[in-house]
Image: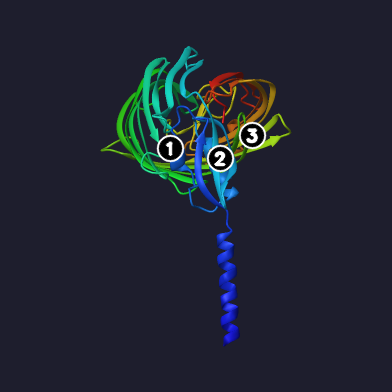
Amino acid sequence: MKTNKCFLFFVLLISSLAIAQDNLVFSLEVQGNKKLKSSFVKKIAKVKAGQILDSVVIEKDIKRLKRLPSISHAYYQVFKSHENFYKVFYTIEENFTIIPSVNVYTSNNNEFAYRLGLYEFNLFGRNIIFGGFYQKDVYSSYAINFRAPYLFSRKLGLAVNFQDLTTQEPVFFNNSSADYRYQNTSREVLGLYEFNFKHRMELGFNLFTEYYKYKSGATSNEVPKALRQNKHLIKGIYEYNNLDYNYQYVSGFRSVFNGQYVGVNGNSELPEFVIAWNDVMYFKRVGSKGNWASRLRIGFSSNIESPFSPFAVDNNLNIRGAGNTIDRGTGAFVLNSEYRHTLLEKDWFVLQGNTFIDAGTWRNPGGKLNDFSKADNIRINPGLGLRFMHKSIYNAIFRIDYGVGITENDAKGFVFGIGQYF
């Protein structure tokens, strides 16, 4: 009995010594930040005073910080304070976050089109995004957006969006097409929740009105010349994100699932439908100046035979050089893959070149799964591009790409834009 008591005492003594010898965090200090609030960084950081000093937790904090729009780079240092207590310093290199945007492209009637925007990505120094845009694409459009991922806590946030978008859209039916004036006025509210460092979700609803009005082209008794419909949408987004950023370089894996139910208010010629798609993205560093990037999108919607199907083949969305909204479908498989290489890097400026291949196939409205293998629905466009980048301004990337079709329905052309293509 006495031997057992001695053994128990020995175990407790060793355990207490082990606990006493753990290195602990004395304080977390934030430096280098100017506009970004130190209190905000401490709010979202996992490292807290009094906790065990853990390099894994610190590394996760740094990766999280580098994902924020307000931060171009971040790193940490650890210094001994006293006894087994240590001070942790997070050093921040901030982005300039009041960003004007200019996007120039060709409209669906081959006229000059543009979008002018202004966004603040670090409102009140708390990484709140607020701004909007004006667009001239045959018709005038505008939008206002508010997004605060950490509004209520380090896990819970809110997004509110209003949009009045009017464009000229081609509608495809009976091997012919017509041009319609399309207007979408929407109001959206989303709740944002972050489970942990890698997993987050969004859930919300959208009330919107769609208005189609015939302009020119083919007609059919089965396709109305004018259609106005009030709708509601329930949206859910789930994201896994394990990306790591180092200025213009990205490495890691990311997957984003988007599911929506669209209902119709009152009697309508348009049925309710469900749409879902998943984007899988993979980035890998290649040597000291290279970056391989790939995105796979798989999407399906209710297979309704309608000229207003949701998945479009478009220059600015999926196939560079294909043209503006040249086809629609109720299912899509799209692969974008490119190699990015830094050609010149001097202080804040980076010139990046890229070579890419975009490939995709679509299911026709009301069609079958074998539509994906039909030559008429397959498009493959390789090409080259350039990126002009500012390292200290968030998303300050002007890109230009030239894609050339090599399949049966080949097309070629330039695509301009702000930010990486994906």
Q: Which mark is residue 62?
A: 2
The extreme left residue here reads 266
**Amino acid, disc 2:** Ile
Nearer-the-camera pick, 124 or 9: 9
Q: Which residue is mark 3?
A: 293
Badge 3 element = strand
The extreme top residue here reads 112
Q: Position of residue 194 (x, y in %)?
A: 45, 45
Q: Earlier in the sequence, mark 1 or mark 2?
A: 1
Q: Earlier in the sequence, mark 1 or mark 3?
A: 1
**Amino acid, disc 3:** Ala
Q: Is residue 221 left or right of residue 330?
A: left
Q: Earlier in the sequence, mark 3 or mark 2?
A: 2
**Amino acid, disc 1:** Phe
Q: Quadrant of the N terminus?
A: bottom right
Badge 2 element = helix
